[in-house]
Image (cartoon, helix red, strand yellow):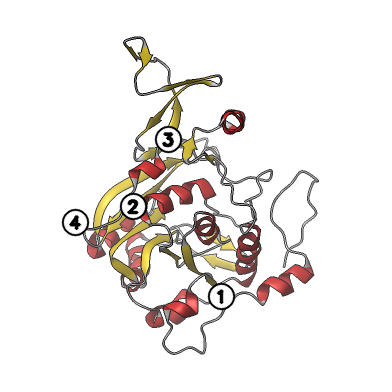
Amino acid sequence: MANRERAKRNKTITLMPDEYIYFSQKICNMKGIKNITVEDILNKTINNNLFDIINRLPQQFADLIIIDPPYNLTKEFNGFTFKSSSKDKYLDYLRSWFPEIVLTLKPNGSLYLCGDWKCTSALQQVMDENLTVINRITWQREKGRGASHNWKNAMEDIWFGVKNVKNYYFDVESVKQKRKVIAPYRQNGKPKGWEQTDEGNFRLTYPPNFWDDISIPYWSMSENTDHPTQKPEKLIAKLILASCPENGIVFDPFLGSGTTSVVAKKLNRQYAGIEMNEEYCCWAEKRLQSAETERSIQGYSDGVFWERNTANMQTAENRRK
């Protein structure tokens, strides 16, 4: 268990030894359970290797599945190293668990699968083999290493698929984005499709499949952990609000530091998450405890998603209302 010395303003989530003991007692292990039920995993952080329990998971229980698997990169995860391989071998890896995960999805459920440019073709292929692809979201990572002999890698993909194209949940009204109006149009002297405020002119827009409003967690954000591939709460919030009804179940088989479960709890959804690393599970439980009283999500305020770097405007808007 790492306990690094932090600057005073650093909000990165850490665990003191007594906290590690406390939260480790809250996580669950399914090793001795032959037939796992929904009740066994509902609103729980499951500390198991997915491959050890995948054939014992309940079927058709999840309204929404969000999967952020290891990308086809060599990456170290707190003592476990995932090694890059050829495209064919990585596709074999996806096929070794993806069809089984699809079995846990309800007939009218939705699934989102995350990846980068290098593995996105394999993700599309395994999605096409098991679901109907509805769309591909591309989101901008404003952080990332520069490259002197290549373009900086600043984009990632999320593949969106469903079991039944004629019956799946999608609430577009809940994921509209508040944007500044650059060229306001008036009709009969009144704003048409936009609102005039003291902070500026804004309109609510329908969400596209390119997202440029996401901020990667960093040291001054209270959601930040030391997980090397942590997804932002705002990004996960969009997926959950769009594709899971209130009180529905969100399942994440590669939970990491707990972002999917935490956001589900903040948005009044139920959750289940599997993570093989005990310390990551403890981070998730600490975040879940905080979510009992702190429900805010950076970039999501007053029921709408705001553009990046608009925190002051959001505060002023909430005060006005």
Residue closest to the eye, 160 or 306? 306
Label 1, label 4: how far apart the Cα atoms are = 36 Å
> Residue 46 placed where, x, y %?
53, 74
- Counting residues from the start of the chain, the first of labels 4 and 2 encountered is 2
Crowding at dot 1, Cα within 10 Å, few <14 / some 14-19 / many 20+, comes out as many
Mark in front: 3 vs 1: 3
Residue at x 42% of width, y 42% of height: 139
Quarter placement of the C terminus: top right
Q: Residue 177 carries which label?
A: 3
Crowding at dot 4, Cα within 10 Å, few <14 / some 14-19 / many 20+, comes out as few
Residues tagged 3 and 2 counted as in contact (Cβ below 8 A): no
Residue closest to the eye, 118 or 320? 320
Label 3, label 2: how far apart the Cα atoms are = 20 Å
Label 3, label 4: how far apart the Cα atoms are = 26 Å
Residues tagged 3 and 4 counted as in contact (Cβ below 8 A): no
Residue at x 78% of width, y 51% of height: 6
> Residue 215 placed where, x, y %?
54, 40
Mark in front: 4 vs 2: 4
- Mark 2 — residue? 159
> Residue 144 placed where, x, y %?
54, 41
- Mark 1 — residue? 47
Q: Mark 3 belongs to which amino acid?
A: Gln
- Mark 4 — residue? 166
> Residue 21 placed where, x, y %?
73, 74
Label 2 sits on a secondary structure element that is strand
